[in-house]
Image: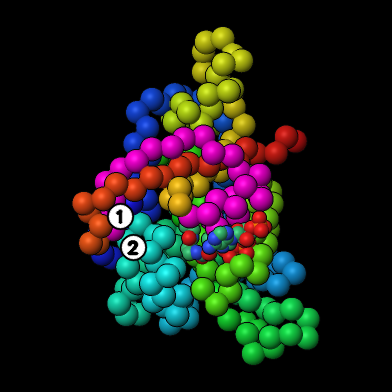
Amino acid sequence: MASSSLPEPPQAPLPLSEKVKVKTTWPIIPPSADRTPIRTERLLLRPLTAADAEEVYGLRNQPEVMIWTMVGLPDKNVDETHVFLKRFLPPNDLLTYHTAIVYMGDAGENEDAKGVIIGTGGAHRIRPETGWPECGYLFRKEYWSKGLATEFMQAFTKFWWSLPRKEIELEVDAASVKERLESNAGGVVEVPEILMAKISRINTGSRRVLEKNGFKEYARWSEQDARVGREADEVALAAYLLEAPET
Ligand SMILES: CC(C)(COP(=O)(O)OP(=O)(O)OC[C@H]1O[C@@H](n2cnc3c(N)ncnc32)[C@H](O)[C@@H]1OP(=O)(O)O)[C@@H](O)C(=O)NCCC(=O)NCCS
């Protein structure tokens, strides 16, 4: 988890030592200016902008939300939220596909909540040098346990696999492609692309969101907890993967 009190670079690479080179595909990420918002039954997923800082701060100042992040602490002020947002704004938009998750309300209900940013989520690391693209999400606590994260991930993963792709050779954690390697004999093996997620093993809500969207656990490990004030503890983590659907 994070080593800084500021929202810092996307998470460190997994401490899984065995790597393997594979042939796979890689998404071609459009700049945020060219992204079309995605509508679900209750949500709108749209590109984040610098102007969202105030609203996103309303999410990132909640200790109950931030305890599950690498940082472990709420943003102290809107300036810290600006630093977080910069990860996803040009020119970093080409290395991430993170969205503002806007609650549009159920028909006829919660009209007050229409148009409010209740979360952020998507792929926060899309760098071939660090392996598979990685996804994640945060929701305001008032909106938990309504099926919204599941709804978000269902739409996001469907969209993710619809992006255009190119072929690539990539070094990845061997554990993520173990089953594929076993059924092949030597050479650089061709494998379906993977979208991965890393979670704390005690984060039941996040685990359920992943499982309900077809993700499977592929690695478990413990490492020093880098969240401020918890450095003396170990934290138990798990990595999940979702394979690209067969075409
Ligand atoms: C984790 C989080 C995204 C879940 O969002 P959510 O909108 O409440 O999730 P959903 O309503 O779609 O629930 C999905 C499942 O998880 C379960 N769940 C949700 N929160 C839970 C909790 N705190 N404890 C146990 N189960 C929980 C739901 O009951 C549901 O399970 P079911 O369909 O099998 O009954 C949200 O709690 C959150 O933002 N937490 C803080 C940040 C975080 O942990 N992000 C993930 C970091 S990897």
Q: Is residue 245 above or below residue 150?
A: above
Q: Residue at x 62, y 47 (%)?
A: 211
Element type where label 2 sits in the image: loop
Marks 2 and 1 close (CB-CB < 8 Å):
yes
Q: Secondary structure at mark 1?
A: loop
Give the residue drawn at x 53%, y 54%: 204
Query: Which residue is more in the foreground, 107 or 78?
Result: 107
Query: Residue 138, relative to residue 160: is it above or below?
Result: below
Q: What residue did someone put label 1 on?
A: 2
The amino acid at mark 1 is: Ala
Task: Verify whether residue 136 appears in magenta.
Answer: no
From the viewer's side, name the closer residue of 89 and 18.
Answer: 18
| Position of residue 55 in the picture relative to residue 243 (left or right) | left
Q: Residue furthest top?
A: 185
First to last magenta residue range = 203-227
Q: Residue 54's image quarter?
A: bottom left
- Going 45% across and 42% down the picture, which residue do you hit? 238
Residue that label 2 marks: 72
Give the answer, above or below, for where 181 lies relative to 235.
above
Give the left or right position of residue 55, taking residue 208 as reference: left
Task: Please provide percent x and percent y for residue 61.
Answer: 39, 76
Q: Which quarter of the figure has residue 103?
A: bottom right
Residue 215, picture quadrant = top right
Q: Position of residue 107 (x, y in %)?
A: 78, 81
Residue 191 percent location from the top left of the image: 59, 27
